[in-house]
Amino acid sequence: MKTNALVVIMMLCISFVGCTKRGCTDPKAKNYDESAKKDDGSCIYIRDYRDAWVGFYDGTKEDIWWTPDTGGVSGPYNATLEVSLTENDSVLKIIEVGSVQYQDAMYYVSMDGTLRSTGEGGGSFVGDSLYYYVGFRSVGAGTKSRFYCKKRQ
């Protein structure tokens, strides 16, 4: 009788352990699952996303300009952007390759790919595409460049 009870208890213990929900148990991860009881190594961190966006992007650029009297659009032109991480990994740096304009465009990027400028500009990553704009304004005048690019394979 004791043997049968011990077998039943062992079977119950094994079934409860086998039913433990697995998932990401780190609250700092993007895919944290509070119902997960056992970590399965699937946690995804913000750095993983930034690394995915680093690289070269080829596409087109349009320049938009305005003054108190006039304005216009020129382009599209071929353009290449280089996206890199800054030294502290908290900000993405985007430069137009071969251009002296906008060499210090720095952006905070959220987990969904939205770019928030540390200066003037913005944009977003969607899949392997980057929409990005940057410019400057003074009293009554300004210029802005818009880029539509896809990541090199």
Image (cartoon, rainbow, N blue to C red):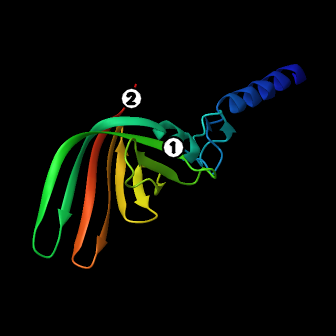
Q: Are marks 2 and 1 in contact (CB under 8 Å)?
A: no
Q: Secondary structure at mark 2?
A: loop
Mark 2 or mark 1, earlier in chain: 1
Q: Residue at x 44, y 53 (%)?
A: 103
Q: Secondary structure at mark 1?
A: strand
Q: Quadrant of residue 41?
A: top right
Amino acid type of the residue tagged 1 in the rendering: Ser
Of residue 75 and residue 87, the one placed in the foreground of this image is 75
Alpha carbon of mark 2 to alpha carbon of mark 1: how far? 14 Å
Would you place residue 80 above or below residue 139 in this image? above
Name the side, left or right, on which 97 lies relative to 20.
left
Residue 32 seen in this snapshot: no
Of residue 27 and residue 126, the one placed in the foreground of this image is 126
The 10 Å Cα crowd at callout 2, few under 14, some 14 to 19, many 20 or more, is few
Farthest residue to the left: give it. 70
Farthest residue to the bottom: give it. 139
Mark drawn on residue 128: none
Of residue 93 and residue 103, the one placed in the foreground of this image is 103
Would you place residue 7 above or below residue 55 in this image? above
Number of disc labels? 2
Q: Find disc 2 in the rendering and name its residue.
A: 152
Which quarter of the figure is the N terminus placed in? top right
Rendering coords of residue 149 (x, y %): 30, 39
Rendering coords of residue 36 (x, y %): 62, 42
Q: Find disc 1 in the rendering and name its residue.
A: 84
Farthest residue to the right: give it. 2
Q: Residue at x 62, y 36 (%)?
A: 21
Rendering coords of residue 99 (x, y %): 37, 47
Amino acid type of the residue tagged 2 in the rendering: Arg
Name the side, left or right, on which 44 lies relative to 107.
right
